[in-house]
Amino acid sequence: MTNTKLFYLKIQNSEVQALVDEDIWLRFCRCRWSLKRSAGCFYVCRSFRKRGKVTTQRLHRLVMDCPEGMDVHHINEDPLDNRRESLQVISPADHAKLHKSTKSDLPI
C-alpha cells in the first residue's frame, strides 16, 4: 500500500477544496480559486485581469495544458479532482459522446 499525500487548493467562499498533484499545488496554491457553473457542473476557476480584460482559466485545462479546440474530461466525473490521473484530453466530439446520456439528466 502506497502512502500518497493528498494536496488540496482552497476555494474562495466554499467549504469544498480541489484535489491536485503536488507540483500543481506548489504552482497555484497562492492563486484565488472559485467555483463557476458551466454545462450543469461547477468547475474550479481563477479570474484575473490581462491587458485590461478579465480572463478566466479552468484548473483542469491548466493542469493538462489543454490546447485550443480540445476538451478535458474528468474520468471519474468529479470536477473537484484535478489530478492528472483523473483527467484526459479528448476531442469535443468524443467528450460529447461521453456525456450524451448525462446531459438530459441535468435540471432545467
Image (spheres, rainbow, N blue to C red):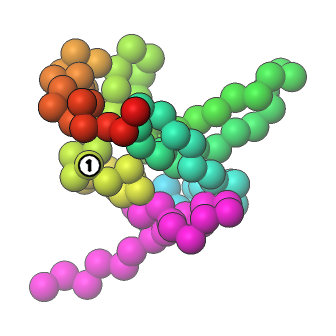
- Residue at position x 69%, y 54% in the image: 32
- Toward which corner of the image does residue 55 lie, by quadrant? top right
**Residue farthest to the front, as pictured:** 108
Assign a secondary structure to mark 1: loop
- Residue at position x 38%, y 50% in the image: 79
Quarter of the figure with the N terminus: bottom left
Asked whether 28 falls inside the magenta stretch, the response is no
Q: How many marks?
A: 1
Which span of residues is magenta-colored? 1-21
Question: Taking 87 as reference, is 35 left or right?
Answer: right
Q: Amino acid at mark 1?
A: Glu
Is residue 99 among what the camera can see?
no
Depth check, front residue: 62 or 57: 57
Depth check, front residue: 39 or 60: 39
Location of residue 52 with respect to 14 vertically, above or below: above
**Residue farthest to the right, as pictured:** 52
- Residue 89: horizontal and vertical position, in percent? 28, 31
Is residue 85 among what the camera can see?
yes
- Toward which corner of the image does residue 53 lie, by quadrant? top right
- Residue at position x 52%, y 48% in the image: 44
Question: Taking 1 as reference, is 96 left or right?
Answer: right
- Toward which corner of the image does residue 95 lie, by quadrant? top left
Asked whether 10 falls inside the magenta stretch, the response is yes
Quarter of the figure with the C terminus: top left
- Residue 7: horizontal and vertical position, in percent? 45, 71
Location of residue 53 with respect to 56 vertically, above or below: above
Secondary structure mainly formed by the magenta segment:
loop
Residue that label 1 marks = 77
Depth check, front residue: 26 or 88: 88
- Residue 64: horizontal and vertical position, in percent? 38, 39
- Residue at position x 48%, y 45% in the image: 43
